[in-house]
Image: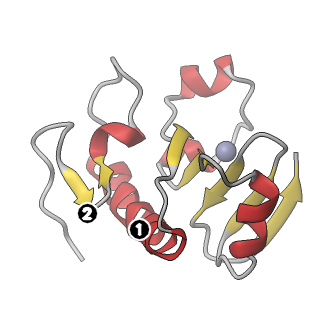
Amino acid sequence: MEQTMPESRDAKLTPHFKLSEFLQAGDPMPPPWVLDNFYRLANRLQVVRDLIRRPLKITSAYRTPSHNADVGGHKKSLHLSGMAVDVVVSGLPPKELQLILVNWTGGMGLYETHTHLDIRPYRARWRG
Ligand SMILES: [Zn+2]
């Protein structure tokens, strides 16, 4: 479904997620197909937010190709299409979050310091 394109970075994609949380400061506004993925991803994250009742801090979301290269991201990283985030939850270690999200549909990367979540159309798990 077509979403109205947000006019500002403060626009709310869902009750708890703002567009700016998916962008790096200084990045240009991404193309509409990326914004569309932000909406889909934010809606999935909102479900998690409602479940755990704590803020999800997004430490990495959309990456431009040069940003992705800088952080050593995979060439086909879903961060490049706005379909992935890395998150941390204060007071909830990644291992506990990952247990809560055992049924997450899509990709979940298990890391010591954060959890990678993406909305690929199939289930995938890996350890960083
Ligand atoms: Zn990631």
Relative to 82, is 1 on the left or the right? left
* Mark earlier in primary sequence (2, 1): 2
**Which amino acid does the dot numbered 1 rest on?**
Gln
Residue drawn at x 39%, y 67% as measured from the top left: 40
Which residue has dot 1 on it? 46
Find the distance from the CA under tag 2 to the CA under tag 1: 8 Å
* Residue 33 in view, yes or no: yes
Disc 1 beta carbon < 8 A from ligand 1? no
* Residue 60 in view, yes or no: no
Q: Where residue 54 appears, x then y in whole percent?
A: 49, 59
35 is higher (above) or lower (below) than 47: above
Residue drawn at x 38%, y 55% as measured from the top left: 38
49 is higher (above) or lower (below) than 112: below
Question: Which residue is the extreme one toward the bottom?
Answer: 103
Which residue has dot 2 on it? 15
Relative to 67, is 10 on the left or the right? left
CB contact under 8 Å: marks 2 and 1 = yes
User: Picture quarter containing residue 100?
Assistant: bottom right
Q: Where residue 79 appears, x then y in whole percent?
A: 57, 44
Other-residue count near label 2 (Cα within 10 Å), few / some / many at <14 / 14–19 / ≥20: few
Q: How has the structure been colored for display? A: secondary structure
